[in-house]
Image (cartoon, coloured by chain):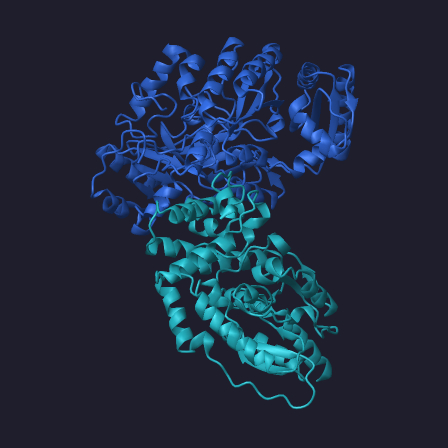
Amino acid sequence: VSAHEPADIDSALPARLAAIVGARHVSTAAADRLAYARDVFPPALVAMRAGGPGHPPDLVVRPGRAEEVAGVLRLASELRVPVVPYGGGSGIAGAALAIRGGIVLDTKRLDRVLDIDETSLTVRVQAGVIGAHLEEALNAKGLTLGHSPQSMRSSTVGGWIACRAAGVHSTRYGKIEDMVLALEAVLATGEIIRTLDAPRSSTGPDLDQLILGSEGTLAVVTEATLAIHELPPHRAYDGFLLDSLEAGLEAVRLVMRRGLRPPIVRLYDAEEGAHLLERAGTEPGPAALIVESVGTEDEVARELELIARICADQGARRVGGGLGRIWESRRFDTTGLLTAMREGGIADALEVAAPWRRLGPLYRAMRARMAVVAGPEGLVLGHLSHAYPTGGNLYMIFRMGDPDGYSRMLEAAFAACRDHGGSISHHHGIGLGKARWMAQEHGQAGLEALGRIKHALDPAGILNPGKLWLNPGKPGL
Amino acid sequence: VTDFRRALVCHDQCVADSPAITVHRTTTLAPSRLALIADRLASGALSWDLDVARLAHLALTSDRERESCICGLDLTGLSWSLRAEAARRDLLPDSVRAVRRDWEARAGPFALAESPRPDGPVEVVHLIDSVALWLAPDSVRAAERLLPSAASVHATAGFELYDLGLVDEARTALAETIARLRALPAVPVVTVSPGAVLMLTEIGPRLGLEPVEAMPLVSRLETRPAVRPQVVTFHDSSLLGRRLGVLEPPRCLLRALGHEVVEMRRTRERAWPSGPRLGYPDPDAARAMAAARVEEAVATGARILVTASPQARHNLAAVGGIEVRDVVELVAEAFGEASG
């Protein structure tokens, strides 16, 4: 069924799993296996659209408690059956694909918001809660997590933690790793780790940060305590047109250096900005910047005025909040990427990160090399959407007619990324698609160190094998 | 086919708005995955079996996902197609088989009463759908009090059969209903059953039957102030709200009665369904959906949870914890109290 070596499944496995989680929460039905045979990894989507089998697991298991997760993992370790944790299945790096069959462990029965502490401003939530539902529960109490990725209607809290996700408000509230205060996670050998939700500690290495971003290869996250915030009473957009992307990057750098923290900072290059400007009825330009400010009305007005002054110094023309409102009205609409794949091509969004000094050159280099691979019929677009005092991320989006060119595109993009000292993933994670660039990112010694940690925590190698390039000798793709 | 094939490449932006996933907590019920299953059934890569048929029935036909779908997928239409094919292959969950048995015996929800012959001029025909009467007799009786000069027709319009994929049975039921309506003078048909309206106006023509002008009674009512104004909240049923687009008339009626209408968190087109219809294979899940909706209603502080759908009234009233009424009942009481 899969292109990779299948798991050796004991015929008694379904019954033994049923004894742990209940018979109705174990399925070997063909329809269930088909449903879990994909996530949103573009090559997997394209292959399934063409009629391919995808990567169906042998079984789907849906535990309802951490103790049940522990039982499943103990049994899988004993029988050496792969286990792939599966939240919303919204990841675009292929981390949730059961490339060696085995068990898909769906976390969506872990779906409770356990406690909202309005005094300490924390929320304790199970890993299978869908992002939008968590935010609704917080908003009902005048609170927000401040984490709203484009996938928040389909992704889960556990999925965010698994890939170190970022939401569109990250410039103010941070990425998910900045929000995690404590985790409950189950090791492959069945032990349950519960870390403390103290605001900071000095008690040795941070287990939360080790598990964050491990994409289900080191442990299965079952619960998290996250920092939350008051819902701002007022928010407003502003927008600016600039003479170049570099001028925009400089403006954003100075905004961050000034200590301002607008939740939304989106700087578009000419190609990507063109669609937005056209909808706004504005003449196309080399770069467009959207910022959103939150707080009291006075705070918002003051922050937007300071940002406007910084942008003016970079030669920007202020165009008001219309661009931001148009962006917001379409913020969940990913039709552009989907259309390319529906028409037989392929598309993806590569999200890299680098310090400010290297970010402009990185953009130019990636764009140039990607454009060669995309060809005259293809398209390469870029924007920045997560900014820090020390640097920012770049979204490099491509569409091309030939799906087989996907690997060549990533090769070109990540070679440019390497040459300019960028990280190959800011928040989508590595999964399957970027696994073979892990040594480029971490160095051989670094990657081997990660492999040794993996082996110590998961001696049978059952947890999400083939992902993150942590299983030496068994490449992902 | 084009419609559901588009959803094979999908970012699943509708998952949070999918009641079936919220209650069953499985990716298999994601609209894009149901589209994938349909595609593989069509190509023969996946075989029909009872598991697949059960899935088609677990997927709700509430249209709730459409609000956030970026693929243009008509999940309700897809589910109806899958259910119809399952029925054609006689792959029916026990719960659906039981509904079909009731239909064949004209028992339970399909038991029919005699329609009284109208005497004098007929201004309107009141279609009393047998399923509506079975689910919410108080709603139907209230409608009868409000329509003293109407000609009543007791019949089964067949929406619940169609919803379960029992297409032949639905066509038979609807044809019988239309024949009885056609025997009366050509006047507008009103009913408390949104499903009956849908059958007469939209689904009937797709089944090869002539459309009949019909409307939900709630769209035609006028009222007067109630004697005891209350704080109420209104549940928009999937059929009345999303399918028929009747969103404001019931609220206007409630305000005209003097009630204060407070809104639930998910309201109008975005209203969460009260649960599934007849024949749903998972009663626990059905109860959970209704309970979640009642919880939303209670959170508003409303004294009465009002709806305008016999199915929704039935589902919500079964939960308890808040008084559940049909808007038609409140209107009838206002007239009764004012005149009595």
Relative horizontal placement of residue B134, taking residue A381 as reference (left or right): left
Quadrant where the image shows the C terminus of chain A: top left
As rendered, which of B264 and A392 lies closer to the eye? Answer: A392
Q: Residue A56, image x and y in percent?
A: 34, 38
Tint of chain A? blue
- Where does residue A309 sit, x and y in percent of width and height? 78, 19
Q: Quadrant of residue A1?
A: top left
Above or below, comparing residue A47 to residue B303 in the picture = above
Viewed as shown, does residue A330 lie left or right of A117?
A: right
Q: Nearer the viewer, residue B332 or A380?
A: A380
Q: Quadrant of residue B63?
A: bottom right
Asked if residue A357 is positioned above or below residue A114 in the image, the reply reads: above
Query: Foreground residue, A320 or A100?
Result: A100
B97 versus B124 height, above or below: above
- Residue A394 screen position, x and y as percent: 58, 20
Residue at the (46%, 76%) spot, across then down: B110
Across and down, in percent, residue A62 comes to 36, 44
Seen at 48% across and 53% down, the residue is: B78
Determine the residue located farthest toward the bottom in the rendered image.
Answer: B119
Number of numbered discs overlaid on the protein picture: 0
| Left-right relation of B71 to B225 | left
Horizontal side of residue A78 vs A301, given as left or right: left
Shown in cyan, the chain is B
Image height check: is B5 above or below A304?
below
Residue B129 visible? The answer is no
Confirm whether residue A417 shows in the render: yes
Residue, x 47% and y 49% (percent of image)?
B22
